Each structure stands twice: as structure tokens, then as C-alpha cells.
Amino acid sequence: GGSPASTFLQGVSLTLATPLLLLGTSIRGKALRQCGSLLGSFVIASLGTLLGAILAFSLNIQQGLITALPNDGIKIAAALVAKNIGGGLNYMAVCSCLNASPESIAAGLCVDN
């Protein structure tokens, strides 16, 4: 609810909140000590996800994406990679940035779950 101006301000502030918090964090300080081996595991898992996506693309899997979702197949595949690395918020952010259709977004969520 609320006025269009307050809705706009809420959207802008929520969009900027996470990056601003992350930019204020020193990776070399306390955060790195607390993360320990978890950070290394995350990097390895992220690289595995990225390499799997590149391998699938190089094996001509994109034809299936184009058949299933003619306009948004590659967009949804990119969003699913982002979701596997960073969670559902990344999925929605990538879909929004790439202007994926609502139908394709829903299909991607159904496939992933």
C-alpha cells in the first residue's frame, strides 16, 4: 500500500540496502576469519555450478531451452545459475534485469523445485 512515492522509495532503499551493507564489510578482517573454510567451499561450489552451465551450453543444450521457452530460455537458464549460487533473490534479480516474462519465470521456478 501507500502512495506511489513511498512505494518507489521503498523499492529504491531495499534495492540499495544489501550492496551498501556488503560494500561496508572488510573481507580481510573479521569476516574472513569467521567464514574460514566455508568461503572456500562456496567458491568451489560456485565454480562447479558455473562450469556445469558452460558445459551444458557447449553440448548444445540451448536447443532444448529454445524449444521449451522460445523467447526466454537462455534468460531463465542464467537466472537458475544465479539461483543455485546465491539463492532465490538472485533468481528474481536476474529475471528482472533480463526482462524475462512472468510465464517463463514461473516455469523456471517449477523446473528448479
Image (spheres, rainbow, N blue to C red):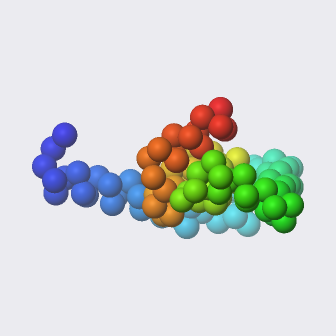
- Whole-percent x and y of residue 19? 51, 62
Name the image quarter holding the C terminus: top right
Residue in view at x 59 percent, y 51 percent: 69
Relative horizontal placement of residue 61, taking residue 14 as reference (left or right):
right
In the image, what residue occupies the spot 58% across and 56% down?
Answer: 70
The quarter of the displayed image where residue 11 is located: bottom left
Could you say which quadrant of the image residue 46 lies in?
bottom right
Residue 53 position in % (x across, y down):
79, 58
Q: Quick one: quadrant of the N terminus?
A: top left
State whether residue 6 is above or below residue 103.
Answer: below
For the residue pair 63 and 53, the one nearer the viewer reads as 63
Residue 25 appears in which quarter of the rendering? bottom right
Total labels: the figure holds 0
Q: Nearer the viewer, residue 29 or 60?
A: 60
13, above or below 106, in the image: below
Task: Tell which of 34 and 48 is nearer to you.
Answer: 48
- Among all residues in the image, which is located at the extreme front? 67
The answer to whether residue 113 is left or right of residue 57 is left
Image point (70%, 47%), residue name: 84
x 33%, y 60%: residue: 12
Q: Residue furthest left?
A: 3
x then y, percent, for residue 110: 60, 34
Picture coordinates of residue 92 (x, y %)?
51, 50
Q: Looking at the image, can residue 105 be seen?
A: yes
Left-right relation of 88 to 2: right
Instruction: Evaluate whether residue 86 shows in this view.
Output: no
